[in-house]
Image (cartoon, grey):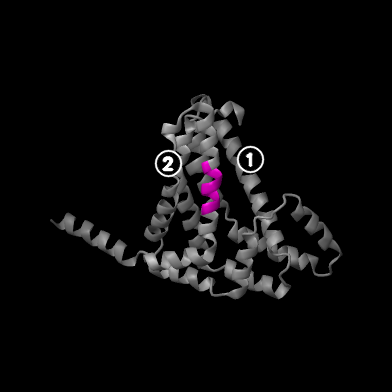
Amino acid sequence: MKKLLLITLALYTQLLFCATSEQVEQYLSISQAEEELLSLESQFSAMQNGFSARTDEEDKTYDMQLLSIRFNEYIEKNLSENEMDSILQNYKNVIFLQFISALSDNNYEKNASALYVTTLQDNPEANTRINLVEKISKKINNKEAIIIMFDELIKPLIENSKGGDKLGDTYLKNRKESYLKTMLLAAKNKTFLAAKDFSIEELEVLLEVAQTPAMGYEIKAVSAATAYALRDFFLSMASRYDISKH
């Protein structure tokens, strides 16, 4: 009886302090997270359809509408009301909102960031700007968050793909290192481009926001929620994924 009471109390406490559905809806409406998820849905739907077309396995297609449901569910259950309140507080900062909008711009070219950084060299405040953006990038493009994506999505896809059972630990380690390096560089480049029209004073404000505990809560929860939402889909593709071609 005592054990049952403790379990009931634990469940009640978890429900009591979880983020509310209203908070989650508000977050999705202002954070660009929903747009990013819709973009992922579109990309992966095309990938899934391509796999099915090549293998005639339509019966194994995955319901992409589950992504949003799973994402929202994870966010709500794994952030407390107080944590979500602090995250929403960051989005009351107009400069941060403008930065998030710039960061979500899909008109992004791979080599544009390197070119932009090169042109900064003639600017007297170049070093200050570069240092600020690099600090911001390290906070918002969290290494641990990218590792979660690899461990929860890419690794299971590889291990369950055709030929995946023949791969050793060295292969997976090298793939992980390569994935981490590629993703961090791409994120850093995108951050530089998103920040190019912000003044030094505005970048200092952005760094303050990036260094808040709330930013850590958000990044950890969103990356884990994305992995949770996509995991079953990635596994549904595994049998149609030939590792020798990738």
Give whichever of 175, 77 is nearer the camera.
77
* Residue 6 lies in quadrant: bottom left
Q: Position of residue 14 (x, y in %)?
A: 31, 62
**Residue that appears at 73% across and 72% down:** 199
| Mark closer to the chain start, 1 or 2 | 1
Reply yes or no: does residue 92 show up in magenta.
Answer: no
Image quarter where the N terminus lies is bottom left
150 above or below 51? below
Q: Residue furthest right?
A: 122
Name the residue type under label 1. Ser
- Determine crowd level at label 2: few under 14, some 14-19, many 20+ residues with C-alpha closer than 10 A: some
- Which stretch is magenta? 38-45
85 above or below 160? below
Give whichever of 225, 21 is nearer the camera.
21
Give whichever of 43, 162 is nearer the camera.
43
Comparing labels 1 and 2, the label whose residue is closer to the camera: 2
Image quarter where the C terminus lies is top right
The residue that mark 2 highlights is 232
The residue that mark 1 highlights is 178
**Residue that appears at 45% across and 43% down:** 231
Query: Is there any visible trace of residue 241 in the rendered image?
Result: no
Q: Position of residue 218 (x, y in %)?
A: 50, 61
- What secondary structure characterizes most of the magenta part? helix
Name the residue type under label 2. Asp
**Residue that appears at 80% across and 55% down:** 115
